[in-house]
Every structure is written in structure tokens, then in C-alpha cells.
Image: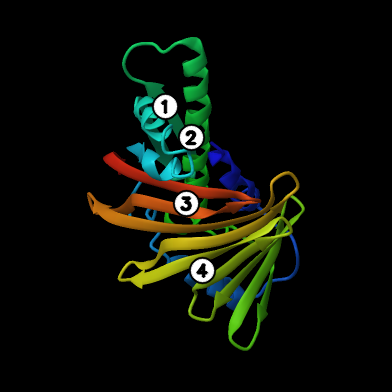
Amino acid sequence: MKITLITCLLLVLTSALPSQVAVGQTSNADQKFLTETRNSYAVLKRQGLIGFNASVIPNWTVMFKDVPVKDRPGLIRTTSRLRFSVEVDATGNFHVTHSIIGAKPARAQAEALDNIAKGVDVSVTSFFMTWSPFMLTYLIPDKLDQFVLQDLENQKVLTYKQSEVAVSVVMTKDYEIKELSTPQGMVKPKLRRDKTGFVLIGYEGSNEDPIAGKVVVNGRVESAPVQGFLLPKTVFITGNSGSTPLNIELSFSNYRINR
């Protein structure tokens, strides 16, 4: 199972995000626009969220839809012994763990389960690396002292460098981020605006991987209020990594909130 292939895009793109930058001269008007952009997002950290723990439940039926029918029930029974949890803090750090319930499996089965579990671990981490800049911290670095902000007819384009990597963010003039790109790839968020600001409801991304080839992902995020905070309930990810289809569904429950 090639769940880990989804990270080819997400890990590369998010590795270029927030910290110090350097590109050009800035103006008070540009700084004001960036501040207003940050304030237009439903950032949970600003609402008082310090972090959370949650259980993660993969939908094995969806993930194994391309496995031969005769092999699918046994594989689902085996992987259903896996348990996953994630810990997230407001600085954007994530830690995913897994365990196996029941009797200790034979060595070969244990290794196979561990490989599958590690793939899920990476997929969960990758999702939060995409979700966090929009919902937990800030996509545009909080201390962005040097940058270029182009004012075009219907949009603004922010460019800066992070660790010598060029980052470009395309925004509408009412602060909706439309695209994030680096030389390695691109992500287009899908946003909904509610009373607290823009909320991430999905994303599209693409990347050219030297091993897998063209990687294209489409994510859909269903969220629900948990103790006053809007948090992921179910995440659906589809796409292709080269000729390999990606079908991932993750559900989140048993939230423990730190505020």
C-alpha cells in the first residue's frame, strides 16, 4: 500500500513556510494588508487553542479498494487491529503514534502492519502540515519584514524567500488565499468564510516527483465544533502518484482539548 506517496507534494511545500525572510523593501500599506489577511482567517490559536490530542481511524475499505476482492476481507481484519492517535500543538508541531491491539502477531505480519501503519502516520502528519497554516497558525509568517507584494488588477501576489526557497502566495484583494507555490509544486486551498474568518474545506495540489512522476492530490475536509473549536472530523484525499491511485479517508474523534 503506497499511502506515503501523498507526502511527495505536501512535505515539500510546507517545508518552505513560516520564519524569517528576505527579498525587498516594504511599506506600511503592504504590512497592513498582510496583517489584515492574517486576521481574516479562523486561526484557532488566536481563539485560545493551545493544542489537542485525537484518535485517528482510517477507512480501510476505501484504502484497500484496489486490492483484489478475495484478499480484501482478511487484510481489513488484520489492519483493524491498528490504533492511531495524533498530538498537535499551536506552534504547528505534530506527533502521530500507532499501536497493535490483541495478541502479538507473528514477525512477518508485525512487519507488514508496521509498514502500513507508518504510511498512515505520514499521511496524517502530511494532512496537518497542510491544515495547520490555514487553521492553527498562519500561512503568511507573523514576522515578515522583507517581501514583495505586487498589486495586480484583481489580486495581490506576495513573494519572499525561506531558506533560499522562493515562495509565492496569490491572494484576492479581500484576503482570500488562492494559491501557494514553490519551485517544487503548488497548492490551491478551498476556503469558506464564516463569522470567525476563512475556514479550510479542501485543497488541490500538484508536484513532479523524480521517482513517482506527476503527483496530483485533491483533499476535502469536513469539520465539526469541538468544545467551541472547529476541528477536522473526516478528511478525504484522492488523486494519483504517477500511475498509482491515492484513496485515503481519515476520521478524527475522542478529542482532548488544551486551551
- In this image, 144 relative to 87: left or right? right
Query: Amino acid under label 1?
Result: His
Q: Which badge, 3 or 1, is on the more N-terminal residue?
A: 1
Image position, residue 9 (x, y; %): 62, 51
Q: Are marks 2 and 1 in contact (CB under 8 Å)?
A: yes
Closer to the eye: label 2 or 3: 2
Closer to the eye: label 4 or 2: 2
Query: Amino acid under label 3?
Result: Ser
Q: Looking at the picture, does residue 220 appear above or below residue 39?
A: above
The residue pinned by badge 1 equals 98
Closer to the eye: label 4 or 3: 3
Q: Which mark is residue 132?
A: 3
Q: Which badge, 1 or 4, is on the more N-terminal residue?
A: 4
Measuring 51% from the left and 65% from the top, which residue is drawn there?
189
Q: Which mark is residue 193?
A: none
Query: Amino acid under label 4?
Result: Thr
Q: Which mark is residue 121?
A: 2
In this rendering, does residue 258 appear at all?
no
Q: Are marks 2 and 3 in contact (CB under 8 Å)?
A: no
Q: Looking at the picture, does residue 171 appear above or below residue 106?
A: below
The residue pinned by badge 4 equals 35
Measuring 53% from the left and 49% from the top, which residue is drawn there?
246
Does dot 2 land on a helix, a strand or a loop? Answer: helix
In this rendering, does residue 25 appear at all?
yes
Q: Which badge, 2 or 1, is on the more N-terminal residue?
A: 1
Q: Looking at the picture, does residue 16 appear above or below residue 175?
A: above
- Marks 4 and 2 sit apart, C-alpha to C-alpha, by 34 Å
Q: Are marks 4 and 2 in contact (CB under 8 Å)?
A: no
Query: Amino acid under label 2?
Result: Asp
- Marks 2 and 3 sit apart, C-alpha to C-alpha, by 16 Å
